[in-house]
Image (spheres, rainbow, N blue to C red):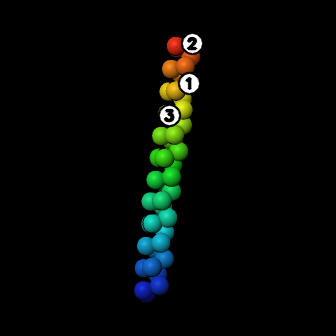
């Protein structure tokens, strides 16, 4: 019982970490894209 709860907790935590990593990647991609757009517009 306790082991099962621990597994579920780990699964939820890994899911949260996955969401955080995806969000960070999206932010980095968005920043690089906006920077490229700015350089294109200015250049």
Q: Residues within 10 Å of mark 1 (few under 14, many from 20)?
A: few
Residue at image point 44% right, 59% down? 16
Residue at image point 51% right, 52% down? 21
SS of the residue at dot 2? loop
SS of the residue at dot 1? helix
Q: CA distance from mark 1 to mark 3?
A: 10 Å
Q: CA distance from mark 2 to mark 3?
A: 19 Å
Q: Nearer the viewer, mark 1 or mark 3?
A: 1
- Residue 10: give x, y in percent of width and height: 47, 72
Q: Nearer the viewer, mark 2 or mark 1?
A: 2
- Residue 6: give x, y in percent of width and height: 45, 79
Q: Disc 1 designates what residue?
A: 36
Taking 4 as reference, is 38 above or below it?
Answer: above
- Residue 1: give x, y in percent of width and height: 43, 87
Q: Which mark is residue 43?
A: 2
SS of the residue at dot 3? helix
Split into 4 quadrants, where in the image is the C terminus? top right
CB atoms of marks 2 and 1 within 8 Å: no
Residue at image point 55% right, 19% down? 39
Q: Residues within 10 Å of mark 3 (few under 14, many from 20)?
A: few
Is 40 left or right of 19, judged from the image as shown? Answer: right
**First in residue order: circle 2 vs circle 3:** 3
Q: CA distance from mark 2 to mark 1?
A: 10 Å
Residue at image point 47% right, 46% down? 23
Q: Which mark is residue 21?
A: none
Depth check: give the residue in front, 39 or 28. 39
**First in residue order: circle 1 vs circle 3:** 3
Q: Disc 3 designates what residue?
A: 30
């Amino acid at each position: 019982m306790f082991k099962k709860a621990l597994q579920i907790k780990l699964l939820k935590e890994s899911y949260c970490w996955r969401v955080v990593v995806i969000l960070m990647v999206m932010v980095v991609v968005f920043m690089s894209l906006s920077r490229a757009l700015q350089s294109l517009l200015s250049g």
